[in-house]
Image (cartoon, grey):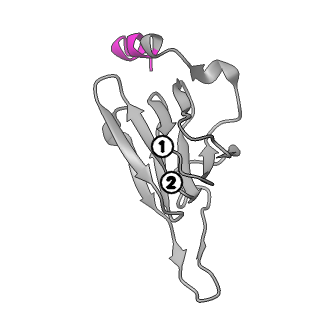
């Protein structure tokens, strides 16, 4: 996978004076069957999250509240995506390095994953990631 496989997904949005609504569904807005859902909240100012790649997991990341940046790297190119609307999700395929930075106060990140949690799926060292990408292992 490359940086060009990362996509910003526009989710359905229904405007209503009583409050707006958006949603996601397996294999409709989310391009995989959701196996795991998790969220990040109360991230202190200046902290970063992520800093890893997955061997087998694809993700969609949504800024439910507030804003943050997602930096995605394929070993050759790096691109930053700003997430600040709850009706957009960032699709990140497996095999790409990702880091989340610049969290605003009270930001809330919702993440959908294509696999169940497996600590062995993570590549947490960027040099190891770069070598694996160069050798075509991921």
Q: Quadrant of residue 28?
A: bottom right
Q: Quadrant of residue 5?
A: top left
In percent of width and height, residue 61 lies at: 54, 48
Q: Earlier in the sequence, mark 2 or mark 1?
A: 2
Q: Please provide the residue range marked out in magenta.
A: 129-138
In percent of width and height, residue 29 lies at: 52, 60
Front position in the image: 76 or 24: 76
Q: Is residue 55 left or right of residue 97?
A: right
Front position in the image: 114 or 7: 7
Q: Which residue is mark 1?
A: 102
The residue furthest left is 76
* Image height of 130 relative to 72, above or below: above
Question: Residue placed at 55% from the left, 42% from the top?
Answer: 59
Question: Residue placed at 31% from the left, 40% from the top?
Answer: 4
* Image height of 131 relative to 54, above or below: above
Q: Is residue 75 left or right of residue 66?
A: left
Dominant secondary structure of the magenta stretch?
A: helix
In percent of width and height, residue 40 lies at: 66, 44
Q: How far is the residue under mark 2 from the one under mark 1? A: 8 Å
SS class, disc 1: loop
Question: Residue placed at 28% from the left, 29% from the top?
Answer: 77
Q: Which residue is mark 2?
A: 67
Q: Is residue 11 magenta?
A: no
Dot 1: within a 10 Å radius of its alpha carbon, few (fewer than 14), some, or many (20 or more) residues? some
In percent of width and height, residue 65 lies at: 59, 60
User: Which image quarter holds the N terminus?
Assistant: top left
């Amino acid at each position: 996978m490359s940086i060009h496989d990362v996509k910003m997904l526009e989710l359905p949005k229904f405007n209503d004076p009583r409050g707006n609504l958006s949603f996601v569904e397996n294999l409709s807005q989310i391009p995989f069957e959701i196996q795991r859902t998790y969220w990040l909240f109360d991230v202190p100012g200046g902290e970063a999250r992520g800093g890893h790649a997955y061997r087998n997991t694809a993700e969609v990341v949504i800024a439910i509240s507030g804003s943050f940046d997602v930096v995605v790297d394929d070993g050759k190119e790096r691109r930053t995506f700003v997430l600040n609307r709850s009706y957009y999700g960032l699709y990140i395929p497996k095999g790409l390095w990702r880091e989340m930075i610049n969290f605003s106060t009270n930001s809330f990140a919702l993440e959908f994953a294509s696999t169940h949690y497996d600590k062995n799926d993570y590549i947490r060292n960027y040099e190891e990631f770069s070598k694996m990408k160069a050798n075509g292992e991921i």
